[in-house]
Image (cartoon, rainbow, N blue to C red):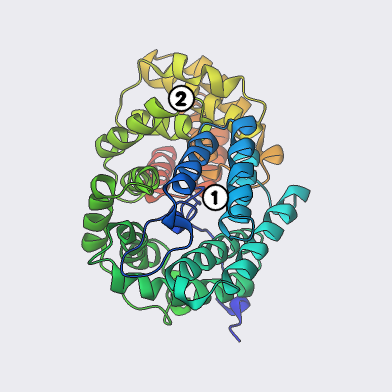
Amino acid sequence: MINTNKYNFKITRVPYIPGILFLMAMMTTVSTSAQLFDSDADKQLIQEAAKYIYRLDSANSKIAIDKVSSSLPEHPVVPLMEAVFILWREMPMHTTDSVFFEFEDKLKEVIRKSQKMPDEYKAEKIFFEMSARGFLAEHYADEGAYLKALGEAHKTYGFMKDGFKMVSYESEFLLTSGLYNYFRVAYPEKHPVYKPLLWFFKGGDKEKGLEQLERAVHETIISKVEAHLYLSYIYLRYERNPQKAVYYLEKLFTLYPENSYFRAKYIEALIEGSQLKDIPSLTVELRNHSRDYYQMSGEVFMGIYEERFNNNPKYAINYFQQAVDRIDKLRGQGNHYVSWAFLGLGRGYLKSNPKLAKKNLLKAKDFAETKWVKKEADRLLEELK
């Protein structure tokens, strides 16, 4: 058994992209029998449900899922769709929320139903169980149950290895294979403390991973949205190429303007690319949102707009302060944007109140999830000496 305590570290995980394995699990397959996709009508129903889920259209999502359930009552796709529906409806979802246990139960149902499928449907058995276990690993890591998370990750990895073999003749495998190849290298590079925990997993290849993900954007059908979203995340948080991130996120925002998650990521990319003029109109929906996470995001974005575009530090400080005042309500969500807010406060007080500036810059480092935030905070702290 791995003793995680000896490493004395705090889990800083890759923030999930909701639905990342959901649509991968509903792909067409080749050279294998497929219970689900023998029917074009069922395939269409599932694609419709996915569209409504991305649009956050609860009523039509439920109707579409019910139609799939009527056609495929014992198939694992039904509880998986129900789980992803819960995830998007409640996002960001905390593992301490009662709704999380409903989500967890749905994923365990996916596993049970996948394991009951006949061996002739091997590809579907693999992908649905892989999807459910991937979600469980993500959320167990989020709540600090690291051994449970690693256990699920090991099981998921076993299924993923089958996908490595199929990627040469089935384009939909490009997504999971690309993600593995990229993050197997990039994540321990960014968080070296994880290296001792990853010895079990085969090595990756960042360049190959990016190439596979780029291909997934153009060559896949069902997993196209996920490929756009994950590539944009990589170019924002890892590769620091905001222009490419804007390219992918603008497509998603145009298709799904009702989706607050896509909106927030699109605005983040615009800011990283110094495209600020439309920030006020784009953030209205976020600032009026019912969830603190999105309200906080909108306040941070407006703070940056006032600071950089309007050159109004007083208004900027006000927005940044509103954002950090929500920390207790966020319960650990949105740390990247919170780090931006503390960094903005540090800049705002740099000349007028050095003591307060230092306090906020140190907080920015505490919440930072990217190297550039830490470097900028260190640079400003040096100015205070």
Circle 2 sits in a helix, a strand or a loop, which is it? loop
Circle 1 sits in a helix, a strand or a loop, which is it? helix
Q: Nearer the viewer, residue 333 or 114?
A: 114
On the picture, is 76 further left or further right than 168? Answer: right
Image disc number at residue 257 = 2
Image disc number at residue 366 = 1
Q: In the rendered image, is residue 361 in sight?
A: no
- How crowded pointer 2 is (Cα within 10 Å; few <14, some 14-19, many 20+) is rated as some
Q: Nearer the viewer, residue 300 or 376?
A: 300
Q: Quadrant of the C terminus?
A: top left
Residue found at x 30% / y 70%: 166
Q: Quadrant of the N terminus?
A: bottom right
**Amino acid marked by disc 1:** Asp
On the picture, is 168 further left or further right than 21? Answer: left
For the residues labelled 1 and 2, the Cα–Cα distance comes to 33 Å
**Amino acid marked by disc 2:** Pro
